[in-house]
Image (tube, rainbow, N blue to C red):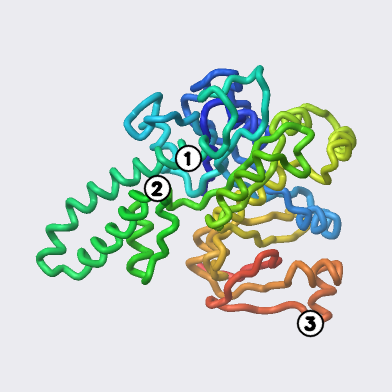
Amino acid sequence: MKAGIVGLPNVGKSTLFNCLSNAKAQSANFPFCTIEPNIGVVNVPDPRINKLEELVKPERVQMATVDIVDIAGLVKGASKGEGLGNQFLGNIRECNAIIHVLRCFDNDNIVHVDGNVNPIRDKETIDIELQLKDLETIEKRLEKVKRAAKTGNKEAQTEEALLNRIREALLQAKSARTIVPQSNDEEVLMEGFQLITAKPVLYVCNVDESSAVNGNKYVDQVRELVKDEDAEVIILSVGAEADITELESYEERQVFLEDMGLTEPGASVLIRAAYKLLKQQTYFTAGVKEVRAWTINIGATAPQAAGVIHTDFEKGFIRAEVISYEDYVQYGSEAKAKEAGKFKVEGKEYVVKDGDVMHFRFNV
């Protein structure tokens, strides 16, 4: 599962990517400095794993991760191949969610591709290009399905009706994610269309350092614009975040954050939001060899969770032994949680809860 960072050139995408990952994408004050998409595997900050480490004292700790993709800046006409449009749009299509960076700061030294700072216009530029690309996809698909629908094919008729609803929304400059599937069949079809504007989106307002806590007039404009989109808006001073990552010690970073009025780096907030955007959650395994956070889809069953460790665990699943994170911490160990009757044995139907501490029994 990957979240792609998109936006116009020079809004802070590559600098943000550098803050999020150990990979160092080229960051320069001109468009198209990122040609190939850079991919960073980023640890998901989670204080729960620190607490488990403290209690279990394992030999090693492995955090959950999320893949972040730095995609080069889109420009007007990208849907028709302007700039490196086709390639960039293809890169976005391969991602499961979108992190849309909007420039919300004034700085005469950093060129804006459209001449002045206006996050509303910038958002609309990107939205229109993505919507035009989706419209092209929908119209090609409609051409094919119409013939089958005319013969009375029920599946084709269902698909045609859905395609027409999406097409109407796109023509009104609305994204495909505004169309809610009315049945399981529509849900499956919608997924199969692989539309860019159907992907969940998170907006990052890149502000100057003084606006990192409360935002500014540009952030207020963005919030007002997206209030009906069911999308989260995060304020981040990407320049300040870059400075924080350069500091050597944890203590130095904390002092810097306190001076800004923050309790943790904005990058940590963003990574957790991206993880949630991808509909991911975490369960833990905790033993003296290793404490580890495992990533699963929200709603995964115990056998599916076991399969993340190894496919054999899922194939030969017998049962899951489960202690909630809260109970584990309250009683201080697996043994004491068991004594207190907080140890549960669950079967194949069990839906894993975020934070469960689990062991699996299997036989292959």
Residue 198, x across and y down, in percent: 43, 52
Q: Secondary structure at mark 3?
A: loop
Depth check, mark 1 against mark 3: the one in front is 1
Q: Residue at x 69, y 61 (%)?
A: 285
Residue farthest left in this picture: 151
Q: Secondary structure at mark 1?
A: helix
Q: Earlier in the sequence, mark 1 or mark 3?
A: 1
Q: Give the image quarter of residue 287.
A: bottom right
Q: Which mark is residue 124?
A: 1
Depth check, front residue: 7 or 46: 7
Mark 3 and mark 1 in contact (Cβ < 8 Å)? no
Q: CA distance from mark 3 to mark 2?
A: 56 Å
Depth check, front residue: 35 or 257: 257
Q: Which mark is residue 336?
A: none
Residue 73, x across and y down, in percent: 49, 29
Q: Residues within 10 Å of mark 3 (few under 14, many from 20)?
A: few
Q: Earlier in the sequence, mark 3 or mark 2?
A: 2
Q: CA distance from mark 1 to mark 3?
A: 56 Å
Residue 226 position (above or below residue 34) = below
Q: Earlier in the sequence, mark 2 or mark 1?
A: 1
Q: Residues within 10 Å of mark 2 (few under 14, many from 20)?
A: some
Q: Secondary structure at mark 2?
A: loop
Residue 5, x across and y down, in percent: 54, 38
Tell me the residue that label 3 is attached to.
Answer: 341
Q: Give the image quarter of residue 339.
A: bottom right
Q: Residue at x 83, y 80 (%)?
A: 340
Q: Residue at x 13, y 69 (%)?
A: 152
Q: Which mark is residue 173?
A: 2
